[in-house]
Image (cartoon, rainbow, N blue to C red):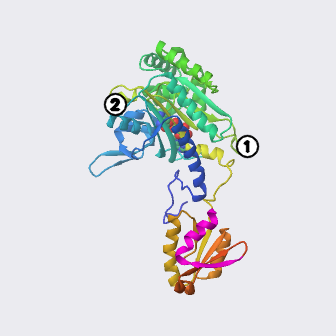
Amino acid sequence: MANKNKIQRLSGMHDILPEDQYYYENIFDTCRQIAEFYDFKKIDTPLLEYSDLYIKGAGISSDIVQKQMYSLKTKGGDSLTLRPEFTPGVARAYIEHGMNNLPQPVKLFSYGPVFRYEHPQAGRYRQFHQFNAEVIGDGSPVVDAQLIQFFYNALRELKVKNIVVEVNSIGDSQCRPYYRKLLTNYLKSREASLCADCRRRAKENPLRVLDCKEEKCQRIISQAPQTIDHLCEECHSHFKSVLELLDEAEIPYRLNPHLVRGLDYYTKTVFEMYSEEKKEEDVSQPRLCLAAGGRYDGLFKLLGSEATKAAGGALGVERVNLLIKDKEAKSTKGPEIHVFLAQLGMAAKRKSLKLFEEFRRARIRVAESFGKDSLKAQLRAADKAEVKYTLLLGQKEVLEGTIIIRDMKTGKQDIVKFDKVVDEIKKRIRG
Ligand code: HAM
């Protein structure tokens, strides 16, 4: 049992240590570069929003709202929630800043932490990071296909192997009510065999049953009526175009007629991406969805704004990292450091602080061990840093206004004027 007196990180939340920063930045940078090429602009929205935004956005019957929100009450009585996803916040910002007056569509990307109170396990955390992309103000199937292309290529660029793209259409307000009725009747006839969660879902939002991973429900799901057989003409032709566009773009996909996604705001196209490359030790683990999204033409009305067509998706950074980390050449080394600044005595220490800053302004990386007093220890640190030059500043040099430059390869030492040393080093390392 955890020692109650010892403060530890929360379950499902993790530190990203310095040696892991490279991997995260690599994922963010790669996605960001592709997003900018696709003409997405970056938007940051607050971590905290009114809870109503997510309740209206994700839907009262979604797992996110039912059990996964980190919510708090302010002293004034407002209910606020830490963002469990980006989409409702980005939609709110679009509405609040009148972005409907900009040329449409408005393409926005964001990245950062999101919070969901989930059962922590491998690849499932309570605080994790997403790279999110939204295209707002365009109902064309090209947008859906381009978003799928964007996430597919981001995963490829990140060297994820054997990517599987699953797609489906879940219809819209025209055709979904009829399908819902069909599904409700079917589920009612098999209610006794459903898991407890699905018995509730069958009443509140029957489509969500199709998303259940329980084995007993899987058997029922496999026989259930399928959305694509009951699409209205518009949804059918929209989906047909999306598939044709994916064929043309040579993006391999699988039709998964039971793919519905866990959020209520989706309409028409939905997609999820996986990797079928498994490490031996995790063959028993359920496959983890790496990126997912879809069209959500109904969300803006739910948020009280005029109807606005939109689509988007998000990539789970931790899950991608779990897959690619082992393959990435570990690059814990920062930029190359050419100089070590060693000092001896208080007067030299004082001068060193200022000199260090002058090197920063000249954009020359300098290593130091100002906390150490022994020259021997400092020279050992200089060796370890594999620098080309060590600068030696002692009492004598301070009095004479000089500094010693030691070439670490040849051992040759030169005395130069203290206020010329930055220029001298610049000359030596930059030629
Ligand atoms: P989502 O499927 O809930 O969609 O999350 C997107 C991705 O976040 C998942 O595919 C997965 O990689 C990652 N993810 C989800 N939950 C966890 C977790 N507990 N731990 C680690 N990673 C996780 C959305 O969030 C939608 N807002 C996507 C979207 C944007 N749809 C339209 N626009």
Question: Which of the pair 339/283 is nearer the observer?
Answer: 339
Image quarter hosting the C terminus: bottom right
Measuring from the top left, give residue 360's x and y in whole percent: 52, 65
Q: Which residue is mark 1?
A: 280
- Asked if the residues shown at circle 1 and circle 2 are in contact, with their CB atoms under 8 angstroms apart, the answer is no
Question: Which of the pair 72/407 is nearer the observer?
Answer: 407
Question: Which of the pair 58/129 is nearer the observer?
Answer: 129
**Which residue is pictured at 53% across the width and 22% down the height?**
190
Measuring from the top left, give residue 266's x and y in whole percent: 46, 28
**Residue 211 covered by magenta stretch:** no
**Extreme residue in the top direction:** 233
**Extreme residue in the left direction:** 76
Mark number, residue 132? none
Task: Estimate the spatial distance between the alpha carbons at disc 1 and disc 2, rounded to whole Å.
Answer: 53 Å
Q: Tell me if residue 287 can be seen.
A: no
Q: Which residues are magenta?
A: 411-431
Measuring from the top left, give residue 151's x and y in whole percent: 57, 35
Name the amino acid type tagged 2.
Asn
**Residue 427 covered by magenta stretch:** yes
Q: Secondary structure at mark 2?
A: helix
| 166 w.r.t. 69: above or below | above
Is most of the magenta stretch helix, strand or loop? helix
Measuring from the top left, give residue 223's x and y in whole percent: 59, 20
Q: Which residue is mark 2?
A: 101
Q: Secondary structure at mark 1?
A: helix
